[in-house]
């Protein structure tokens, strides 16, 4: 009888713990924001700027957009190469014609740039 109670208790604790740590899904905007153009413009500039690096590989790409102004983007790349590993970011602005202008770029360009404005 005692073993059945222990097994039941372990099962209940397992179910309780399975529900812990689940995150609430963020609310989606009604209109999707197209980040693809900003990401592609940043990637072209990144590849041009780092063309001399040996075995350059982008290991991570993050795109952030301002929620109250969907014309401002931060695209940040993490990269590795034979020369050096690092992070490099771009702040871009979408023009009225739909193209993307690079406002600034560098190692210190991160999502914090949009948050702190």
Image: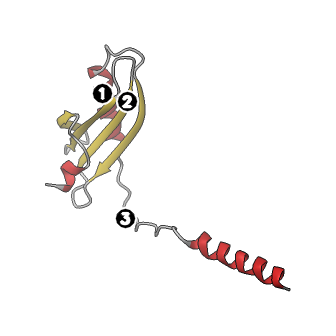
Q: Residues within 10 Å of mark 2 (few under 14, many from 20)?
A: some
Residue 50 occupies quadrant? top left
Using the numbered discs, state the Cα–Cα distance from disc 3 to disc 1 in whole angstroms: 29 Å
Marks 1 and 2: in contact by CB < 8 Å? yes
Using the numbered discs, state the Cα–Cα distance from disc 3 to disc 2 in whole angstroms: 31 Å
Foreground pick, 28 / 104: 104
Q: Position of residue 76 (x, y in %)?
A: 31, 39
**In the rendered view, does 18 fall on the left or right side of 103?**
right
Q: Residues within 10 Å of mark 3 (few under 14, many from 20)?
A: few
Q: Position of residue 112 (x, y in %)?
A: 22, 50
Using the image, determine if residue 117 lies above or below residue 12: above
Res. 46 mark: 1
Foreground pick, 7 / 59: 7
Residue drawn at the location 38% of the way across and 39% of the way down? 61
Q: Which residue is mark 2?
A: 79
Residue drawn at the location 67% of the way across and 72% of the way down? 14
**In the rendered view, does 31 fall on the left or right side of 10?**
left
Using the numbered discs, state the Cα–Cα distance from disc 2 to disc 1 in whole angstroms: 10 Å
């Amino acid at each position: 009888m005692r073993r059945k109670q222990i097994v039941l208790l372990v099962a209940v604790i397992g179910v309780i713990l399975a529900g812990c740590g689940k995150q609430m899904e963020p609310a989606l905007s009604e209109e999707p924001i197209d980040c693809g153009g900003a990401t592609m413009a940043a990637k072209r500039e990144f590849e041009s700027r780092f063309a001399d690096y040996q075995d350059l590989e982008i290991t991570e790409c993050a795109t952030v957009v301002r929620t109250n102004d969907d014309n401002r983007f931060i695209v940040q790349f993490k990269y590795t190469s034979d020369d050096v590993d690092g992070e490099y970011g771009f702040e871009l602005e979408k023009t009225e014609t739909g193209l993307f202008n690079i406002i600034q770029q560098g190692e210190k360009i991160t999502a914090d740039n949009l948050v702190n404005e």
